Every structure is written in C-alpha cells, then in structure tokens.
Image (tube, helix red, strand yellow):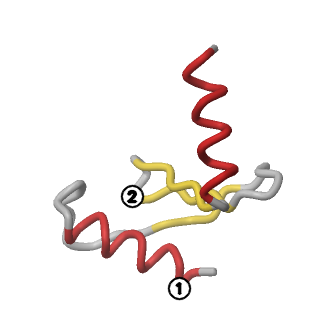
Amino acid sequence: MGKDINKIIKNLKDIGIVDQVTFDYEPLSGGTTSRLYLVNHKYVIKINKPIVLETETTFLQFY
C-alpha cells in the first residue's frame, strides 16, 4: 500500500505539481473502496480504479 503512495508522490514531484523535497503522509479512514492519504497536511490523494474515479468526478462536477 505505501509503495503506491510513494510512487504517486514521486510522480507529482517529477512533473512539477508539488515541489516539496520531503513528504509525510498518513492514511485516512472512511473510504469505501478507495485508499485516501493526507500528504504534508495539505494534499489528499485518492487511489482507486480509473473508471471509479472518472465516475465520481463526473458526479461531483454535475452537482
């Protein structure tokens, strides 16, 4: 589980979305099938299957 989040954080740094040198993260509870992480007390990263994230995004944009 932690391996996925470390890879995502590295990718975010590599493409310039975040510029912090070090990161701390903690898992958040309360998700159904998604894994949620709070990164540096500032960012929330949600991990799930792409189709699930697309559907949720469409729903949230509509409402």
Residue lying at the far bottom in this picture: please name it. 3
Please state the total of marks drawn on the protein image. Answer: 2
Which of the numbered marks, if any, corresponds to residue 12? none
- Which residue is labeled 2 in the image? 40
Q: Position of residue 13 (x, y in %)?
A: 23, 67
Does 42 sit above or below residue 34? above
Q: Residue at x 48, y 66 (%)?
A: 25
Quarter location, residue 23: bottom left
Q: Position of residue 28 (x, y in %)?
A: 66, 56
Classify mark 2: residues with Cα within 10 Å, few (<14), some (14-19) or many (20+).
few
- Which residue is labeled 1 in the image? 3
Q: Position of residue 62 (x, y in %)?
A: 60, 17
Residue at mark 1 to residue at mark 2: CA–CA distance: 17 Å
Q: Residue at x 60, y 30 (%)?
A: 58
> Disc 1 marks which amino acid?
Lys
Quarter location, residue 1: bottom right
Does 36 sit above or below residue 4? above
Residue lying at the far right in this picture: please name it. 32
Would residue 30 be found to the left or right of residue 51 on screen?
right
Mark 1 or mark 2: whose residue is earlier in sequence: 1
Would residue 13 be found to the left or right of residue 46 on screen?
left
Q: Nearer the viewer, residue 19 or 16?
A: 16
> Disc 2 marks which amino acid?
Asn
Q: Position of residue 36 (x, y in %)?
A: 63, 57
